[in-house]
Image (tube, rainbow, N blue to C red):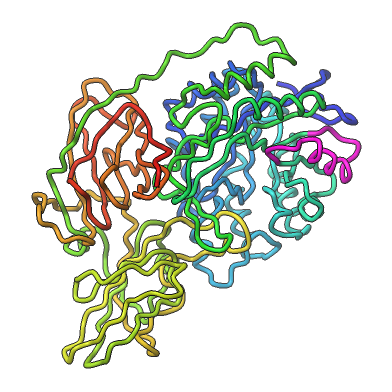
Amino acid sequence: MSQLTIQGKQLMLGEQPFRILSGAIHYFRVVPQYWEDRLLKLKACGFNTVETYVPWNLHEANEGQFNFVGMADLEKFTQLAGELGLYVIVRPSPYICAEWEFGGLPAWLLADPGMRLRCHHKPFLDKIDAYFDDLIPRLTPFLSTKGGPIIAMQIENEYGSYGNDKAYLNHLKQALIERGVDVLLFTSDGPEDFMLQGGMVEGVWETVNFGSRSAEGFAKLLEYQPDQPLMCMEYWNGWFDHWGEQHHTRDAADVAKVLDDMLAANASVNFYMFHGGTNFGFYSGANYPDKLQPTITSYDYDSPLSESGDLTEKYHAVREVIGKYTDLGPLELPAPIAKKSYGTVNMTGQAKLLASLDGLSSPIQSVCPEPMEQFGQNYGFIMYTTHLSGPRPASRLNLQEVHDRAHIFIDGKFKGIIERADKEHDIVFDVPAGGVELTILVENMGRINYGPQMKDAKGITEGVRHGLQFLFDWTVRPLPLDDLSKLNFDSVDGESEKNQPSFYLGEFTVDEPADTFLSMKGWTKGVAYINGFNLGRYWEIAPQETLYIPGPLLRKGNNEIVVFELHGCESPSVSLQDYPVLNKQQ
């Protein structure tokens, strides 16, 4: 491997002029058994480089405890890419956006109420430095200056969209250099004046991100960086989906035309995304333009490879354009990955949440209903219970303020839902002389990953009032739902009360594991697991109706599905089919 350098307006790899033709594949959104398949398809499409973010919250989910195994094995992914003849661009900036929970920042940062994010705030910098002390030495052996595939690394991600703290950016630059990073460093920002002014770092190559109007984007970059090579670090050839929207698609011919324009301008490009993959578990992020918009579980992105790795029309259109600028030869692909329909799975076991709390959580006494981060919890649900004395006249229940969706129970009976955006709701109740037990189950639907609302603690963030009076003395149960092994399942209650959250258990047999898609048609809202692996959230609203199950998550013989359903289902059964539904109509 040779070092990537800049000589005037030309990128050079060693002594040779070089154009980066890169595609984004996030190792953390693809099961490791499929990394090689996706990388080979990237190379076969004509790309010479793979780009990936590095999500801090995956690698240090709990402070000081580092994880680089399984889907988090960044070193193995990097090594594999190099072995397959691809260069690698790594973006280890503390913040990645990526429609990923909290933009990749770890939730435990929010346990400090005074934490300041993405600026030269010493407590924040100290956490980054401790993380980099573990992360960066894992990457330095793979730098091209040491014979490895990594040719470039990013300092921060679209920082100019957020802030303008140059001391912070220079701290990150020095943090990489001091830990032995000697490959080309870069930043990436939108092609707007304020973004480039806020995000650029002296002595660091700037790139721009856009999905169209490439000439305009590059013209703006040249105003700020006139004598260096052009690169679109994020060519948005597709887009992501929020719950409640329609599945985004983009015409393949349009994508190909914009790519052609960039290559004709002698620019380098990185497809965001080449292969989107899946937001497994609770890792989907959210946006907040004027209300919370949670991202769906699928990260298909309408990219050249589908969520399950299939070639799309866009793949062939893109390859044809690349073939105009470099000799590709015949298309050689890895063997197809099988997909199977395993039919209907009847759920034979049921465990109601309110009766299962001791197997899921230990109670914590708290004066106030604090956010989950104050109890060392990152994801999932959190439950708050208190006794309300009576008698009291009918008054409105007020949550100040809930992040993100609260189920209200009075003496175990469902009373209604209060969502984050609900400034008005109709949950009003009186209290008899003996008092009542008030229980509030709050769902974390994904921390905001972009914009000024990112400091997004989950649970009840301020307090609870009945009428004018704040309520104190709470029993809190963190419910991360990361270990369901202690649940005791009874037979399914055919007359189960609606809106009583329950876990459902079903089993099925597999002769040969293959990719399949779990259809949640007829279910309302919740989370699904296969053999203990959290597949992610489902919701009856558009657009996503199926959850992708990669074949390696199945085992030959008996397999187990657990569904945590919040509201109820039409029938306690699911189906496993050989095709996805990502464009369900509302």
Give coordinates of residue 427: x percent, y percent: 32, 76
Q: Is residue 223 magenta?
A: yes
Q: Residue 383's image quarter?
A: bottom left
- Residue 526 in view of the camera: yes
Q: Residue at the location (63% across, 30% down)?
A: 142
Which quadrant is home to the N terminus?
top right
In the image, 361 versus 225, the foreground residue is: 225
Q: Nearer the viewer, residue 36 or 133?
A: 36
Q: Residue 236's image quarter? A: top right
Left or right relative to 56: residue 542: left
Q: Position of residue 510 (x, y in %)?
A: 21, 25
Which one is in front, 186 or 62? 186
Residue 294: % across, % down: 47, 54
Q: In the image, residue 284 lies at what x, y percent?
A: 46, 49
Asked if the stretch drawn in magenta spans residue 448, the answer is no
In the depicted structure, whether residue 296 falls above or below residue 168: above
Q: Is 296 positioned to the left or the right of 426 in the image?
A: right
- Is residue 476 visible from the viewing direction of this image? no
Q: Is residue 225 left or right of residue 528?
A: right
Q: Residue furthest front?
A: 586
First to last magenta residue range: 210-230
